[in-house]
Image (cartoon, helix red, strand yellow):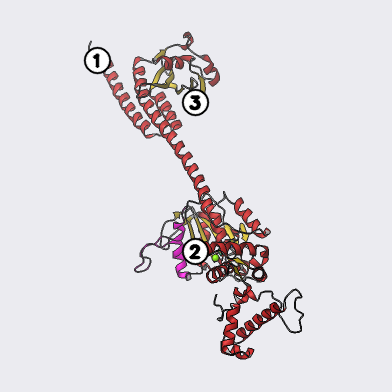
Amino acid sequence: MDSSGPAAESATQSADDRLSALLYLSQQLNAERDLPKLVDLMAREVARLLAAERASVFLWDRATDELWSLVALGSEPLRFDARRGLAGVVVQQGITINVPDVQQDPRFYPAIDARTGFHTRNMLTVPLSNHAGEIIGAFQVLNKQQGVFTTEDEEMLKAVAAQAAIAIETAQLIGGLQQQRDALVAENTQLWQAVEGRYFQQPLLGNSPLIRQVVRLIEQLRDSSVEVLITGESGTGKELVARALHYTSRRARGPFVAVNCAALPSSLIESDLFGIERGVATGVERRIGKFESAQGGTLFLDELADLSAGAQAMLLRVLQEHVVERIGGRRGIPVDVRIIAATNKNLEEAMSQGTFRADLYYRLKVIHIVMPPLRSMREDIALLARHFLEQFARELGKRRIGLTSEAMQRLENYDWPGNVRELAHEMKRLVVLARGPAVAEAELSPEIRQAGKPTVHMSNSLPTEMSLKGAVEELEQHMLQEALVASGYNQVQAARRLGLSRQGLIKKLKRYGITTRAGRT
Ligand SMILES: Nc1ncnc2c1ncn2[C@@H]1O[C@H](COP(=O)(O)OP(=O)(O)O)[C@@H](O)[C@H]1O
Ligand SMILES: [Mg+2]
């Protein structure tokens, strides 16, 4: 046979074309890792390559013995019994079937046409087998645009199917791995949340309604990343609450970064928070800001009211756009940081004086936690005092001590301007200095010992349940205290006021455990 005729030449030409098309398709298939997109791509390309009206990829679900198509070109996803139809025969027997007229073939399964509304005339189906030789599905082209599918089309479809099977397996594998990884990441985050929550050993103590309300709110905010504003006097537990919010949230594993906005001058706070690029000023090195260090976690802005106007503007932008720009930087850096802010100042006042931006205030106070001063939860003073005595005894390796009921009464009467922090400090002092197993009233710091105590005047009738000795002691202590304060803690002067020798005064002070210097606690 003469192979140099025009017909043979065109056949060679088209074989070349098909080969390069096949190569191109195989490259594309290998680049696509998303299974639905991959199947869609294969179907589209193969229909074009073989001049077919439609192409479908069926995957064989061996568990249910069903064939299903992820995306069949121009039709809805299908799922049907793998023992039916031509595709069924192909996967069960692993053979290629080319049917020039389906209406004449009893193996044809017309129910699918009925479902898709497509009218099949002819059909070519090849098995899809993975590289272990297992059949994983079928590849099908329908309705040759002119005539019927040829043996060349069969060879072509088999070649594409070999590539497609590998790409499908890879995509399935990757999809499976991704699902597993996502599940693991979710599980891991949950576990860390639980673990950190448990190891966060400093719960907010107190049974007063005000504290219980705060505890409930923290619990409600567990799964949220919303900004929180905490206000309250110094020492009321604002930072403790901020930490509790962080360590019980999904961000628990991320960093908790605390910034004291009042600790740095305004010129430095901006670069401290937002970072700075190298060479902004001579000798300036590039530095990452606290916002970036808190990536994935919580940024605690303490003493918020002291934030400079420039930093307030920058902070507002970060809250709105979730992007920080370093000083002197030209591009924004995306940040995922939760802001918790605290202040003991009155922000509304600061706003009316123009030192705090109203838009920033309203943005931050969506959730507003107000920490009660200790004097408004006196019922919790005893609980907190015992807690701190025990904590410091443990930490300092000291004996566990208690409080006499008189001493406890003083604690409960005192106004605690420094709130829980002041109470903690006082308990630490007692753990260090205490002589007996129970702290006596006389061992308390003077300002606490005086708290709510009726001033004893000779004209006042003394409490009847008090022994003479007790009353005299009480009066003595009181007078010693007053003489010390009046003389500015000068012992010689105080002794003169009381008509005592200096030695006599020192003896009495010692007996009552009165400290002799102001503020020495
Ligand atoms: N309700 C509370 N229960 C236990 N400890 C508390 C409580 N409130 C405050 N503290 C403790 O008191 C100290 C001061 O709290 P902190 O959060 O620093 O106060 P603030 O930030 O409001 O000045 C910390 O040691 C904190 O652990
Ligand atoms: Mg604080």
Instruction: Give the structural element (helix, strand or loop) at label 2.
Output: loop
Left or right of 304: which side holds 467? right
Residue 238 spot, x, y in % from top left: 57, 62
The residue wearing badge 1 is 5
The boundaries of the magenta stretch are 266-295
Does residue 281 show up magenta in the picture?
yes
**The C terminus lies in which quarter of the figure?**
bottom right
Mark 3, residue position: 74
Label 2 neighbour load within 10 Å: few <14, some 14-19, many 20+:
few
Task: Give x and y (percent) for residue 471.
Answer: 70, 79
Q: Are marks 3 and 1 in contact (CB under 8 Å)?
A: no
Tag count in the figure?
Answer: 3
Q: Left or right: where does residue 369 sit relative to residue 266?
A: right
**Is the CB of the residue bearing disc 1 within 8 angstroms of ligand 1?**
no
Picture layout, residue 223 above or below residue 67: below
Can I make out residue 97 in this image?
A: yes
Return the mark for residue 397: 2
- Give the spatial CA distance, label 3 vs label 1: 41 Å
Asked if 307 appears above or below 512 in the picture, the reply is above
The amino acid on which the numbered mark 1 sits, given as a three-letter code, is Gly
Q: Label 1 to label 2, Cα distance in Å?
A: 104 Å
